[in-house]
């Protein structure tokens, strides 16, 4: 699944709905043995790896809630995520965006997630985000009780793993992913290459899947104890929306989880309404209404 797909939709709404981005302070490096402060670029250690990221802050007084943007697949750097700040900063919410391990200014080796390596790589990426969470919890301009995660596509597998390893995450938002195993998602994506098959037919065919699963999020979802919003498009031919929703609703009922599912019936994986070829103007207002209720704002 491609993180760039999400950002294409994000740019559309930025152009039409959002004010110009606030200017950032100059890049900063936190003084040794001193709590970091201010907007800018930061280098965060995670063992032998350094994750490079940028903190964007609103122009209003802080401390601020902060969203960590967890990208999907692909090799784009944090600069591809820059439009997200135009959504958040005018609402008084800070943004942390980062280069994935091995990309941009982050060290380590980058690998594409596949069926064989997914059980190792997805937890590894979660450990990098956990290091970011711990860093932001010490930042002078951030409210440590209002750190939340946005995982898009592949990032929706990462977000629950992070939340399960810390009490510093208030809630998570997962978009177009995260409910099925890597094997099931790849199988669905491959089947969807046949344009003659409907979403309903594709979903039904998943019952016949007998292959390997690779990373399976079931255990992480069963253990999740923070509120979670799952946002899906009903016309997604990359991720199995209705299979995911079934899995989530089952876990929600069996484990009494605070899961909310928001379905946009005509939205595809690009976040575009296939009936209008436009970005749904209700996408962000509905998500922000849910998020603000969890932040108590």
Image (cartoon, grey):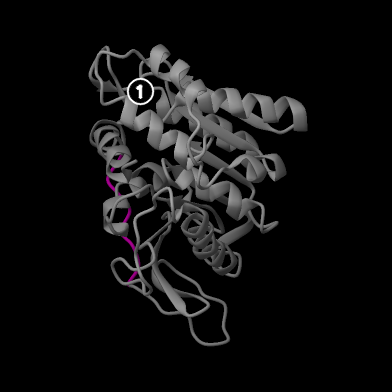
- Residue 105: where, in percent of width, then height? 31, 72
Q: Quadrant of residue 6?
A: top left
Left or right for 121, reference 219:
left
Q: Is residue 243 above or below residue 32?
A: above
Would you say residue 296 is visible in this rendering?
A: no
Q: Nearer the viewer, residue 196 or 65?
A: 196
Residue at image location 61% in from the left, 29% down from the top = 248
Q: Is residue 54 above or below residue 49?
A: above
Residue at image location 57% in from the left, 31% down from the top = 290
Neighbourhood count class around disc 1 (C-alpha, 10 Å): few under 14, some 14–19, many 20 upward: few
- Quarter placement of the C terminus: top right
Dominant SS of magenta comes to: loop
- Residue 21: where, in percent of width, then height? 30, 49
Q: Quadrant of residue 131?
A: bottom right
**Circle 1 SS class:** loop
Q: How many marks?
A: 1
- Range drawn in magenta: 19-26
Give yes or no for residue 21 being in the magenta stretch: yes
- Residue 236: where, in percent of width, then height? 36, 25
Q: Nearer the viewer, residue 40 or 262?
A: 262
Q: Quadrant of residue 35?
A: bottom right
Residue at image location 63% in from the left, 52% down from the top = 163
Q: Nearer the viewer, residue 286 or 176?
A: 176
Q: Name the residue carrying label 1.
A: 281
Residue at image location 46% in from the left, 52% down from the top = 118
Would you say residue 166 is visible in this rendering?
A: yes
- Residue 161: where, in percent of width, then height? 59, 52
- Quarter placement of the N terminus: top left
Give yes or no for residue 219 being in the magenta stretch: no
């Amino acid at each position: 699944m491609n993180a760039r797909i999400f950002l294409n939709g994000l740019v559309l709404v930025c152009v039409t709905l959002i004010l110009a981005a606030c200017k950032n302070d100059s890049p900063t490096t936190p003084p040794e043995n001193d709590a970091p402060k201010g907007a800018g670029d930061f280098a965060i250690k995670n063992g032998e790896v350094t994750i490079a990221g940028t903190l964007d802050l609103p122009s209003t007084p802080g401390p601020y809630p902060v969203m960590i943007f967890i990208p999907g697949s692909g090799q784009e750097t944090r600069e591809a995520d820059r439009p997200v700040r135009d959504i958040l900063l005018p609402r008084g919410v800070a943004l942390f965006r980062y280069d994935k391990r091995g990309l941009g200014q982050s060290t380590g080796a980058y690998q594409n997630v596949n069926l064989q390596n997914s059980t190792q790589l997805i937890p590894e990426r979660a450990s990098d985000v956990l290091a970011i969470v711990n860093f932001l919890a010490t930042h002078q301009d951030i409210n440590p009780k209002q750190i939340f995660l946005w995982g898009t596509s592949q990032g929706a597998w990462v977000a629950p793993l992070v939340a399960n390893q810390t009490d510093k995450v208030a809630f998570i938002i997962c978009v177009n992913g995260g409910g099925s195993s890597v094997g099931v998602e790849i199988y669905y994506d491959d089947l969807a290459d046949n344009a003659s098959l409907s979403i309903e037919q594709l979903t039904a065919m998943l019952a016949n899947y007998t292959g390997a699963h690779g990373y399976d999020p079931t255990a992480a979802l069963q253990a999740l104890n923070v509120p979670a919003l799952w946002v899906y498009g009903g016309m997604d031919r990359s991720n199995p929306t209705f299979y995911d929703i079934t899995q989530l609703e089952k876990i929600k009922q069996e484990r009494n989880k605070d899961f909310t599912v928001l379905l946009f019936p005509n939205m595809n994986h690009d976040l575009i309404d296939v009936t209008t070829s436009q970005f749904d103007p209700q996408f962000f207002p509905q998500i922000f209404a849910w998020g603000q209720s969890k932040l108590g704002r």
